[in-house]
Image: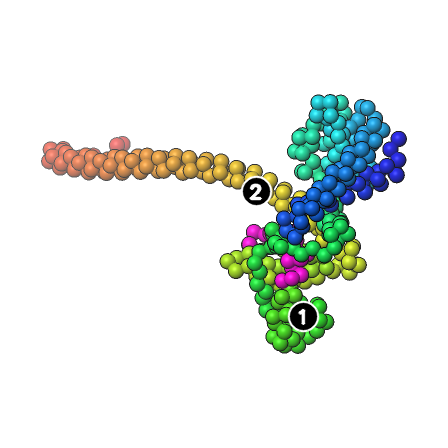
């Protein structure tokens, strides 16, 4: 039997392991010594061993004829098998897509880890994934702080461009951070403290904002730890156009959850939109080819029709000419006839 204590332990170890791995990836951006990096790698291996041991306990308690087990919420444990080696994937799966895995399980089919690497990303609960990534980022910062104290970053985050700040963004920052709601007064404050304000915006942006969306007009949306959304023009001069707080009338955590849920919905819709656009593009291309073929046929028919029309006009002209000749001969005949004969036009009684 899989106990709640075991599930809790596995989730704790999973978060710790993923956070440790995140710390290792961040090493190139931090001023870590070789000794510090070595200790971090050794600690990661230790957590990995404990996590794998806990996963094996779950695997042993799973039904033999099923490779799926529900753990908590939308999180599912999925057993995989590569030859004689067994392992466990723990992922959040949308309930509406869980049937895709259950269908395979009903066929008494064992998954390989590479198959799950292909299947799971498309059916994962994106909101849960985003929330989990935030937990990893926060825990990774705590681990670095706990193990090494204050570490100075020596490189910016990869998705942050060299940024400028618009006047509008500066005014909005003053209104939200300084509490100066009046726009003209906020603008006066911004002018008087321009350098400090722009530095504060860029620092906050670089330290905690993450790219969450890019639209079709080269505008990116970055979302930070304080629920501030930065609207960024990704043109030749990357500029923060404006910024605003995502506030739906709830507390900070609930507002954040709603943003991530909406992002998940947008990802689903954009995927469907791309599918429809791809299908539509194929249909439009085929229809365009058919229309071009019809246009060619119509041009051929129009050319043939022009030839036939010309032939018709020639024949009509010839008919007219021949009728005139016949009428002239008839008149000539009538004149000569009348010289000899008189036509009877009376009534025979």
Q: Which quarter of the image is occupied by the C terminus?
A: top left
Residue 103 position by quadrant: top right
Q: Residue at x 22, y 35 (%)?
A: 318
Dot 2: within a 10 Å radius of its alpha carbon, few (fewer than 14), some, or many (20 or more) residues? Answer: few
Residue indicated by mark 1? 174
Q: In the image, which residues are magenta?
A: 202-218
Q: Residue at x 71, y 22 (%)?
A: 83
Q: Residue at x 67, y 38 (%)?
A: 122
- Tell which residue pokes out farthest to the front in this image: 35
The reply, left or right, for residue 291 in relation to residue 114 is left
What is the total number of numbered labels drawn onto the structure image?
Answer: 2
Residue indicated by mark 2? 277
Residue 153 position by quadrant: bottom right
Dot 1: within a 10 Å radius of its alpha carbon, few (fewer than 14), some, or many (20 or more) residues? Answer: many
With respect to residue 194, does 28 lie above or below?
Answer: above
With respect to residue 54, does 227 lie above or below?
Answer: below
């Amino acid at each position: 039997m899989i106990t709640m204590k075991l599930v809790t332990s596995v989730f704790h170890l999973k978060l710790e392991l993923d956070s440790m791995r995140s710390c290792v990836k961040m090493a190139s951006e931090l001023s870590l010594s070789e000794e510090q990096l070595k200790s971090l790698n050794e600690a990661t291996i230790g957590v990995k061993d404990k996590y794998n041991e806990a996963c094996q306990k779950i695997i042993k308690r799973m039904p033999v004829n099923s490779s799926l087990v529900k753990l908590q919420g939308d999180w599912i444990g999925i057993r995989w098998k590569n030859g004689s080696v067994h392992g466990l994937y723990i992922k959040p799966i949308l309930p509406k897509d869980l049937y895709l895995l259950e269908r395979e399980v009903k066929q008494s089919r064992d998954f390989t880890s590479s198959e799950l690497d292909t299947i799971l990303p498309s059916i994962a609960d994106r909101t849960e994934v985003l929330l989990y990534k935030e937990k990893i980022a926060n825990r990774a910062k705590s681990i670095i702080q706990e193990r090494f104290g204050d570490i100075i970053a020596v490189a910016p985050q990869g998705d942050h461009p060299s940024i400028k700040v618009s006047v509008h963004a500066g005014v909005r920052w003053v209104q939200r951070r300084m509490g100066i709601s009046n726009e003209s007064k906020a603008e006066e404050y911004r002018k008087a403290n321009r350098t400090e304000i722009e530095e504060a915006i860029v620092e906050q942006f670089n330290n905690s904002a993450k790219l969450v969306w890019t639209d079709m007009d080269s505008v990116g949306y970055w979302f930070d730890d304080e629920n501030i959304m930065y609207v960024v023009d990704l043109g030749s001069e990357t500029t923060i156009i404006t910024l605003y707080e995502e506030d739906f009338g709830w507390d900070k955590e609930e507002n954040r959850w709603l943003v991530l849920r909406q992002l998940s919905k947008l990802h689903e819709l954009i995927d469907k939109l791309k599918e429809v656009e791809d299908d539509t593009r194929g249909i439009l291309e085929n229809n365009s080819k058919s229309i071009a073929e019809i246009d060619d046929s119509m041009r051929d028919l129009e050319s043939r029709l022009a030839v036939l029309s010309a032939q018709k006009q020639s024949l009509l002209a010839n008919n007219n000419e021949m009728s005139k000749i016949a009428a002239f001969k008839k008149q000539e005949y009538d004149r000569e006839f009348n010289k000899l004969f008189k036509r009877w036009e009376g009534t025979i009684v």
